[in-house]
Image (spheres, rainbow, N blue to C red):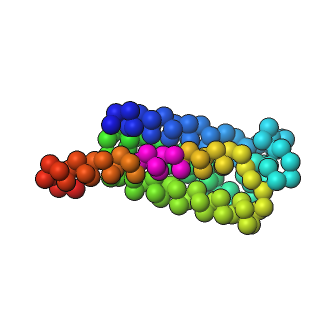
Amino acid sequence: MKTVQYLIALLALAGAVVSYLALRVHYSTGVEPCSINEHWDCGIVNHSSFAMLGPLPVAVVGIAGYLAIAGLALWRKPYLLLLTVLVGLGFALRLTFIEEYALMVWCLYCVISQCLIGLITLLSLGWFTLEYNRLRRSGGAA
C-alpha cells in the first residue's frame, strides 16, 4: 500500500507544479511557451473568463486541490482521498468540456493536469477497493 500512497502523493505534487505553471500563464502578459497554434494556446485559456472561480484563478484551486490530495494520501485516508479525487476529476472534466466546446482551444498544462487526475483517480479507486475488501474480510467497519 505504501507504494500506491507515495505514487498518488508524487502525482499530486506534479499536478500542483502543473497548476502553478498555469497560474504563471494567468498572470503573464507575454507570449507563452505553450502557445503552439490556434488550437493549443494556454494564454487564451488562462486569460478567459472561465479561468476564474469567483475571485480565485482556477489554477489556485488546482494547486490547493492537488496539495489536499497529496496530504490525504500521505495521511493514509483512502476514503477521504477518493472523495476528494472524484470532486477534482469532476472539476477537471468540466474545465475540459469548456476548453472543447466553449473556447475551442486547449491548454497543454490543463491536458497534463487532466491526465494526472485521471491516473490519481484510478490509483485511489484501487486503493479504496483494496482497503474496503481488507476491512470486510477482517470484520471491521468500513
Residue 13 is left or right of residue 51, and the answer is left
50 vs 38, nearest the viewer: 38
Residue at the image point whose x is 74% and y is 66% from the top = 102
Q: Position of residue 120 (x, y in %)?
A: 48, 46
Is residue 134 depicted above or below 89 in this figure? above
Residue at the image point whose x is 65% and y is 59% from the top = 96
Instruction: Work out which residue is located at the far left of the displayed protein and give it.
Output: 139
Residue at the image point whose x is 30% and y is 47% from the top = 130
Q: Position of residue 115 (x, y in %)?
A: 59, 47
Q: Position of residue 125 (x, y in %)?
A: 40, 51
Residue at the image point whose x is 66% and y is 49% from the top = 110
Residue 63 is left or right of residue 123, and the answer is right
Does the rendering let one see residue 64? Answer: no
Residue 73, quarter of picture: top left
Magenta-drawn segment: 118-124
Residue 51 is left or right of residue 65, and the answer is right
Does the rendering let one see residue 32? Answer: yes
Main secondary structure type of the part rendered in magenta: helix
Q: Position of residue 32 (x, y in %)?
A: 80, 40
79 vs 137, nearest the viewer: 137
Quadrant showing the N terminus: top left
Residue 91, quarter of picture: bottom right
Is residue 4 depicted above or below 62 in this figure? above
| Numbered-mark total | 0
Residue 69 is left or right of residue 54, and the answer is left
